[in-house]
Image (spheres, helix red, strand yellow):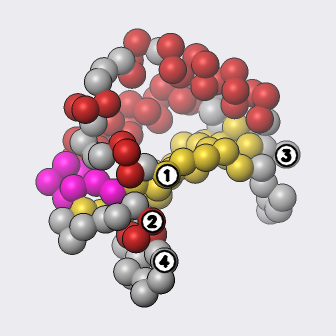
Amino acid sequence: MSYVDGFLLAVPKGNIEAYKEMARLGSEVWKDHGAIAYVECLADDVPYGEVTSFPRAVQATDDEIVVFSWIVYRSREERDQIMKKVMADPRLEGDPASWPFDGKRMIYGGFKPFIES
């Protein structure tokens, strides 16, 4: 069974093109190191909930778009090996303060699928 890293974040509307450029590079790096899928999605039908929602989870403002993304690996073990390579890849060097979004509000984690069809 595969393994998935999931991400949720808010990107200022004025930074969407810069984020897309960053995501294209991320896709290239993760795939070069062995990830089997890399997906980035911009919110399209994501209402602001009364109690909880995607926008609330990342404290998105009216000037931000929620991004939902995931990376798929063959296994947790392979993911751990790939992540070491990705984090050491010079293509991703840079100060998080230069990211086109607020990394402090990014939600991420690793998940073990229980259904794959």
Q: Position of residue 109 (x, y in %)?
A: 61, 46
Q: According to the image, label 4 marks what residue?
A: 52
**Amino acid of disc 3:** Met
Q: Which mark is residue 1?
A: 3
Q: Residues within 10 Å of mark 2 (few under 14, many from 20)?
A: some
Q: Return the disc, 3 or 4, that comes first in the chain's sequence.
A: 3
User: Contact (CB < 8 A) between labels 2 and 1?
Assistant: yes
Residue 98 in view: yes
Magenta part of the chain: 10-16
Q: Residue at the spot x=14%, y=54% of the render?
A: 14
Report whether 44 appears left or right of 64: right
In three-dimensional space, the C-alpha distance between marks 4 and 1, rounded to whole angstroms, equals: 14 Å
> Which mark sits nearer the N-terminus, 2 or 3?
3
Q: How many marks?
A: 4
Q: Nearer the viewer, mark 3 or mark 1?
A: 1
- Mark nearer the N terminus (4 vs 1): 4
Residue 107: assigned label: 1
